[in-house]
Image: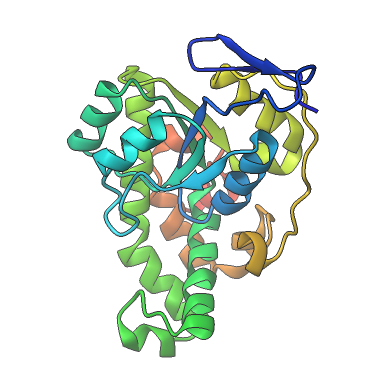
Amino acid sequence: MRESFLNTRGMILADSSSPGAYKPAVSVLLTTMPKSGSIYVTKTLAQILDLKTMYIANPATGLINEEDALTFCAGGYVSQNHLVPSPENLQTLQQLKLKTVLHLRDPRQALLSWVHHLDWKYRTEGLILCQPAYYEFSLPSKIDWQIENYFPKLISWTQRWVEIADEGVIPILITHQDDLRCNEWEFFDRILAFNQIQLRFKLPNLPRTLDATHFRKADPEEWKLTFSSKQATRATRGIPESLQKRFCWDDERFRAAA
């Protein structure tokens, strides 16, 4: 049951004692690393808050559409995007006074999940998101290709967003997939508090399936069992030391090897 709702200025809008009075006037913006549990987080928040979902950015470019952003600002939405940290996006976020949750994951595990995601999209939809020859590669060769071509972009994206968060250019709450895995209720409670929403809630416990939430597994150790020693060393070496230490991505075994 909802106890009370606050908008982004902290004003109480409705409570559970007045049935039918609830009008959604908040929106929650998520900026997520690909393959970090984005869909599961989005759908869970939408159910907790009884809000609709939408994108404010072009999924292909990560650039904000101003018209969609204005719709979002009116309230009533959870919007999950892989926003690029471009000057244009930052200007729009500042002008509209938008805050965002920056949701991250160990990039080595995110890369492995990305490999499986590409295979799944190709197998189920025939969608080609990489060069055609890639889909004929073995799993180790696919991982090699992604470390070489995709991983540097993922790290650059992460590093820039973390810098923006530290600079205080816009209000940013950094969350991590391990937080979701270890204490799901507290994870969502932090997001609500960041958005100035006071609410008693129960987790909806969505189905953890590919069809429902794109959920595969949340094992943070999977990459260690799948990557070769050489691949693990290359990937770990590609993560700046500042990020390794800050987010505990500095696994000693592979740091020493690097």
Residue at 66% of width from left, 55% of height from top? Answer: 221
Q: Position of residue 235 (x, y in %)?
A: 44, 57
Residue placed most toward the observer, 92 or 230? 92
Which quarter of the figure is the N terminus placed in? top right
Q: Position of residue 137 (x, y in %)?
A: 43, 86
Residue 178 visible to the viewer: no
Snapshot quadrant of residue 69: top left
Q: Position of residue 114 (x, y in %)?
A: 48, 64
Residue placed most toward the observer, 30 or 79? 79
Residue ranking furthest to the left: 87
**Above or below for 258 versus 196:** below
Residue 120 visible to the viewer: yes
Residue placed most toward the observer, 99 or 138? 99
**Above or below for 58 versus 64:** below
Snapshot quadrant of residue 20: top right
Residue placed most toward the observer, 63 or 112? 63
Q: In the shown orientation, is residue 252 left or right of residue 94? A: right
**Above or below for 111 versus 83:** below
Q: Position of residue 134 (x, y in %)?
A: 37, 83
Residue at 66% of width from left, 63% of height from top? Answer: 212
Residue at 54% of width from left, 50% of height from top? Answer: 38
Snapshot quadrant of residue 171: top left
